[in-house]
Structure formats: structure tokens, C-alpha cells
Amino acid sequence: MKSLLVVLLPLALLAGTIPASANDEAGYLAIGDSVAFGFNPLVFHSDPTDTDAYIGYPEVLSKHVVNASCSGETSGSLIAGPPDNGCAGFRSVAPLHVRYTGTQLAFAVAYIRAHPNTQLVTIDIGANDLFVLLRTCAGSSSCFAAGFPVMLSRLASNLVTTYQSLRAAGFRGHLVGLTYYVTDYNDQNTVAAIGAINQVVGAVTTAFGGRVADGFKAFQGEAMEAGGDSCKAGLLIRLPTGGCDIHPSRLGRQLLARAVEAVN
């Protein structure tokens, strides 16, 4: 489960290249979960309200990003609100990068309508759907085997709803889905599960004219030089108690941002 958590940046698909204007003010909207938000347990335990200390790959890409992501967001809660994997709880104690009430998708739609010339939208979503399933099944392999295909189908449906809503709001810019990395590339069960999620994100994103940013491969090269371990490769946030959190370190964020840039 620990390594499972890891990859988070659903497939970044762009229907072209990311134009220079994507770095201009109001040109870039980021949505998604804790990977986009830049969740850091060290910040959370010292001062959870210090929003500027949470830095995700969107901030690496642009100083003017409007980052509406929320830690613990699932593909379903992004659309309709709780239940989720911690987003509502996080919002109860700490502000997001952008102030809004209601759901992330509702904010994104309103933003697109107010900024019809938005050039880029990135999204990473789906890992928390998996974590919710794992928690629900509590170690039962039969429960997971029955629930995983259902989860993938629901993820696909939720992505369709999200993308349809953005396009209906008038978004005609570049759509990028960032795929997830894994903490241990030797863990074949995790690699297979994350791979299945990434395939769903990629297929739906491309169907809506987007392109895929390969977060999986972005980490893989560095991790394999460290025996397949993303922590040892310095890609994850190191904990003072030893080991690593599942969220990207500064280097990890840079690699994910480069993955998005690579689809230019």
C-alpha cells in the first residue's frame, strides 16, 4: 500500500504544444490532488496554514499558475464533494492555494468562463480512488479483485464528466493529464495497479484532445539507478524519522514539471 500511494500524476496529454503564453498571468489552471497541491507532511505538522510552503509541480511550471488542487481529492469528490480521501478534512484546517467554496470542478468551470483565453489546464487524479478502495477492502484480496475494475470504470466516467464540463465552459486550450509515479519500481503489484490507472487517464484525456505527461517514466529512470527505490533516488520527501513520505521532493517536482514540458 505504501508504494501504491505513490504515483500520482495522471497522464498529461496536450493537443499540441504548450505555448509561451501558458506562463502568462491567468494562462494556466492546475487541478488535481496532493501531488499538484504540493503536500508536504513536514509543513503540515509545523504550520498547516502556510500555503506558500506547499509547492507542487504547477508552481515549478509557472509563477502565475492558478492552482485549485486539494490534497486527498478523488475523481468523484472533485466533481461532487465528499466522501474523499482527506480533502475536506484538509480544507477544514488549512487554506488551499485558491480560495473557493464548493467543489474543485465547480471552481474550474467558473474560472474558465471568467478566463476564456486560458491556455493550459493540467490534471492529476485517480490515486486517491485507489487508496479509498484499499482502505475499504482492509487487506482482502477478493474485495480488491472485485472492486478494482469498478473503480477504474468510475474513474473513467468521472474524467469524462470533468473534461466535458471544462470543454462546455469554453476551454479550448491545451489539456494535459499527468500520470503517476511509484515509490518502488520493483513492486510489480503496485506497478500494475498504477499502470491501469494511468492507462485510463491517458485514454480519456486523449479522447478529449489532450496529451499525456509521463510521470511514471519521469521517476523511473532516476529510481532504477537507485535499485528501483524512488526514496533512495531523492525523488520523495525525506522524513526526519527515516525513510520518505510518498510525495515528491524538490527534485521529484522538477521531474514531473519536465514531463509536462516534454509534451510541448
Image (spheres, grey):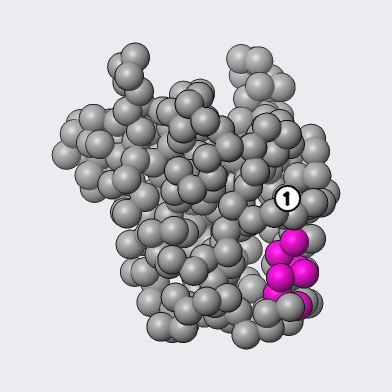
Please state the horizontal and vertical placement of residue 110, each as a whole percent of the image: 77, 69
Dominant secondary structure of the residues highlighted in magenta in the image: helix
Residue marked by disc 1: 78
Please state the horizontal and vertical placement of residue 183, each as a whole percent of the image: 37, 33
* Residue 143: quadrant of the picture: top right
Q: Nearer the viewer, residue 217 or 82?
A: 82
* Residue located 54% across and 45% down the image: 51
* Residue 245 to residue 163: above or below: above
**Considering the numbered disc 1 on the image, is that residue within a helix, a strand or a loop?**
helix
Q: Is residue 61 magenta?
A: no
* Residue located 71% across and 22% down the image: 136
Judge whether residue 160 can be spotted in this image: no
Query: Which quarter of the image is occupied by the C terminus?
Result: bottom left
* Residue 230 to residue 178: above or below: above
Q: Nearer the viewer, residue 116 or 180?
A: 116
Please state the horizontal and vertical placement of residue 71, each as a whole percent of the image: 60, 40
Judge whether residue 18 can be spotted in this image: yes
Please state the horizontal and vertical placement of residue 208, each as a whole percent of the image: 64, 73
* Residue located 52% across and 31% down the image: 47
**In the image, 183: left or right of 36?**
left
* Amino acid found under the numbered disc labelled 1: Leu
* Residue located 30% across and 35% down the image: 230
**In the image, 15: left or right of 184?**
right
Residue stretch rendered in magenta on the structure = 107-113
* Total numbered circles: 1
* Residue 211 to residue 198: above or below: below
Q: Residues within 10 Å of mark 1 (few under 14, many from 20)?
A: many
